[in-house]
Amino acid sequence: MTSAAAARAPSRITLGLLAVLGLINLVRGAIHAFLPDSGAGVIAHFDLAQGGRTIIFLLAMIGAGQIGSGLIDLLVVARFRAFAAPLLAVELLRALIALYIAFVSKSVGTGYPGAKGIVGAAVVLTLATLWEFARPKAKA
């Protein structure tokens, strides 16, 4: 291993956060993909009387993506650690876009599961990403 590779080894904070995100993504994805109503009715209490099939379909498709993201998060932690810092930055970007969508551009208010989690995830990911990219490099 070169000194540059050793210097950029991801921190335990980054690896731990990616592992937690991976598990969260797998669980959320499984809920959306495999619950009969994708969680829209039984969890979020959305009115599915109009457009219910479309909502369920879209949430199930999002669930498939969340499962893929969760697997990538866990694979990076387990085997491909060189990608941990860039993946953390991608997760931050995703969280910031979700924050913008949820509270600015397409807001439906805060009366749904995960509204507070969107804010919390953006804050934690911002702090972790700043830490990961600002921490001192390891000595050779």
Image (cartoon, helix red, strand yellow):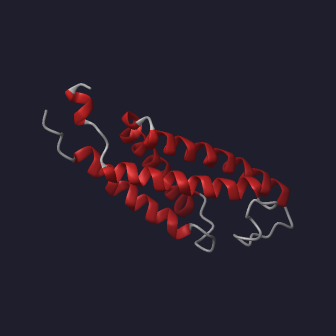
| Residue 51 seen in this snapshot | no
Dividing the picture into quadrants, the one containing residue 30 is bottom right
Q: Name the quarter where the N terminus is drawn.
A: top left
Q: Residue at x 57, y 67 (%)?
A: 114
Determine whether 136 is above or below 29 in the image: above
Q: Can residue 18 be seen in this view?
A: yes
Residue 29 position, x and y percent, is 65, 53
Q: Where is residue 65 in the image (x, y as percent from the top left)?
A: 64, 45
Outermost residue toward the left in this view: 139
* Residue closer to the observer: 31 or 90: 31
Q: What is the residue that sits farthest to the top in this orientation?
A: 2
In the image, what residue occupies the spot 77% across and 60% down? 35
Residue 104 percent location from the top left of the image: 53, 61
Where residue 136 sits, quadrant-wise, is top left
Residue in the picture at 57% in, 43% down: 71
> Where does the image place residue 23, in percent across and percent down from the top left?
54, 55
Could you say which is closer to the camera, residue 22 or residue 105?
22
Q: In this view, does 22 lie above or below 42?
A: above
Q: How many labels does the image show?
A: 0
Q: Quadrant of the C terminus?
A: top left
Residue nearest the viewer, comparing 58 with 136: 136
Left/right of residue 24 with respect to residue 18 in the rendered view: right
